[in-house]
Amino acid sequence: MTSGVARVMTDCLLLCCRSCCYSGAAVGDLPSCVHEYMDVYSEVVQPDAAELINSPFGGRYCGPIPPRRRVSLFRTLALAFYTDKNVSTSDLFTGRYSFINDSEYEVGSPVAGSPCSFLVKGAVKPTGVIVSPTYPGAYPKALNCHYQFLGVPGERIRIEFRDFDLFFGGPHCPFDYVKVYDGPDNNSAVIGTYCGQQRNLVVYSSESALLVAFVTLPRTANTQNRGFKGIFEFSNSFTKLDFISKNDGEHIRGTECDQKILSKKESSGFVFSPNYPFPYMPKLVCRYFIYGMQDAQHLERVRLEFVLFDIPKGSKGDCSDGYLKIYLKGQETTDSYDKFDYEMCGEESLPAVVVSDGPRLVMVFSSGELMGRGFKANYTFETEYKVPGTAAPDGSCFFTYRSSSKKSGDFNSPRYPSNYPSGTNCSYLFLTNNNEQVTLIFDNFKIHADSANASVGSYGVVLCQEDWLEIYNVYRDSTEKMVGRYCSTSAPGPIESNRGAIGLKVVLHTDSEGVYSGFKARYSFETAKSIFGDCGGNVSSQESGVMTSPKFPENYDGPTKGQSSVSCNWYVSVRPRFKILLNFERFAIEGDPALRGCPAAVLRIWTDLSSYPKELCGEKGAMDRWEYISTSNTMRFSFIAADKAVGAQGFRAVWTEVQEGPSCDEFQCETSGFCIPDKLKCNLVNNCGADDNSDEAYCGSRMAQTDRPLPPLGLILLLLLPKVAWLS
């Protein structure tokens, strides 16, 4: 079976050889073929029986499954049939053979020392066919074929694989593969490595040289894949890439004109249509992949603003002849290109500014028959905080929430629920209309803090020294008064802006080490309440009183439907040069300062009106001492429960006018040493503080004659004074 100018192609139509199949062995594979089989040799160099000894073995077949088509690598193909039976049956196998011209397999000038390597020069053969050595027959093992394409300066090479079928050993192609290099040899940059079955595989060189390597593994296992066939073309009419290189873009190897642009941290630049500023060529498709930064420290988005736009509309006034499609989420898979966000064409006006939804933006430019000037657009990488609200125009982490724009909504730390970046300062400003207050409620809270701090609950400037969140009342004269500093998992309690304030400000500070998920919170602008809130009062000219939560000893309630919070504010003042002692007898407010803070309900105590308050929740044990003393003759208390509060018993506290110092003209408490008014002795109320009942001891029969205990301040207001400066 020889021919001077031909190869041999065989098709086995029927195979009925007997076999002995071991468990787990497939018919047609060794060692299952024992009694009758057919051997195939498709790499025989010379038509000599002795040559078979040195020829690679092409496979052994038996059973009912015939081998696939075979094409000889050279000009000889051998079939060997074996049987150990004396009597053979008819039609053991049948097939067809033909002699085919081998000129198609000579892709270019043969390279010495290899039966399947060629040099293709564009000046000699500007177009042609590239085909694997035995296509469409099953390709041999242990091949190492190279197809080197060399054009003249200014040319590029295009290869379109119209059929591609290689053994698939995994996405990294560790066995058989085609590797394409963007240059003349295997030291050039790799465009891609391909195996398995490929569809619509087209590659372009960046310059005038390209190398295609086809390698198959020298293995025992038999494969019957057919290889590949495609067409190639040398041309100087393919898109020139200078419209990419003139900016910070990088050509994506293997494509005609696709490019990617990577952020250099809040960088900016321009993108152009092909051949800009001259008219673009017809029938082009170019993709632009614009990537902002996305890592543990950075997250960006892409802003795109057009400077020039001229893509003529089609005859029907639509974008059927040419368009620019924009994908705000950065679609990168072929099957998602029909899910675009914008389709642009025309020349009358510039398209609107677009901003990506995330760190990636993709553009696809397609030109039809009509030609236009194309487009020029300015891209800017902006830091993306993923915070709802009106962002600062300078791109800083500053967000404003105005009642005039939206009455309620959410806000959160940058990138929540992902970790916030380190080394960041973010501000959130909530501005009310006249006669309004704003309420903030925190639903999730986790700010990085030292582990020692976190173990006891982190609240205040002493404990929160790494990452922290601060809340301020903001006043019309631009002054700010801090409510508190928070970190770890100790969430702030619900907070209402003060009467007289124009809003609240939240500041998140993160240092250079350690990050957590941050916070998620809600805001609500509502009609301003009384200065005392929904309950509470202003008390003076008294020496003592009892303060309780609403409905005590029953559980307090949350706000009525439509309100975000319920609040009670008490303001207490005593005689000058005296102080106020506050002693909690009962205390149970939902929350846990050490584990989760006071997100649903809280009692704030200002022992010093010029400082920020103490924030209380949780439950007081029977033996716990919960006692506070003011720094002056005034004290403020504020109880607030959010709409997510489930209720608890609340609190009962006794406040007393006390005098500190070595001398006492009235009753001096035995244990605490406080000096209290004589009239408070034997009044059925412990006014000396925690663990000191000396004012109620030795009362005897006088107990029956004492004044009745003072009513709770939460129920009766003893005396209302005009509002003074410190109440606001």
Image: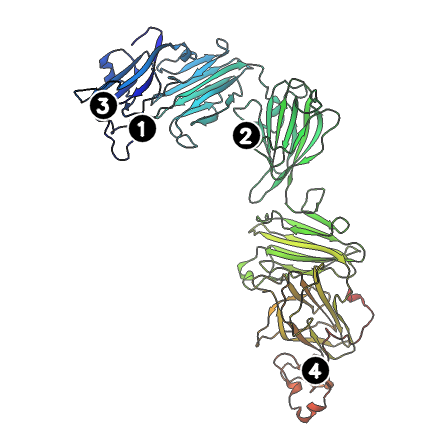
How far apart are the two marked residues, 4 and 2, measured between alpha carbons?
A: 83 Å
List the residue tagged with mark 1: 221
Identify the image quadrant of the N terminus.
top left
Is residue 186 among what the camera can see? Answer: no
Q: Three-letter amino acid code at disc 3? A: Glu
- Mark 2 is on which residue type? Thr
Q: Which residue is label 2 attached to?
A: 334
Residue drawn at point x = 47 percent, y = 20 percent: 161
As measured in the structure, the alpha-carbon distance from the residue carrying label 3 to the one carrying label 1 is 20 Å
**Most extreme residue toward the right, as rendered?**
722
Residue at image location 47% in from the left, 16% down from the top: 149
Badges 3 and 2: C-beta atoms under 8 Å apart?
no
Q: Is residue 56 left or right of residue 280?
A: left
User: Hey, which residue is sitting farthest left in the picture?
Assistant: 86
Which residue was labeled with disc 4? 675
Query: In the displayed structure, would residue 446 be above or below residue 120?
Result: below
Residue found at the far top of this picture: 4
Percent across and percent down for residue 294 are 57, 40
Which residue is tagged 3?
A: 36
Tell me the distance, in whole angstroms, between the alpha carbons under discs 1 and 4: 100 Å
Q: Sequence order check: which comes first, mark 2 or mark 1?
A: 1
Q: Which mark is residue 21?
A: none
Which is closer to the viewer, label 4 or label 3? 3
Q: Nearer the viewer, mark 3 or mark 1?
A: 3
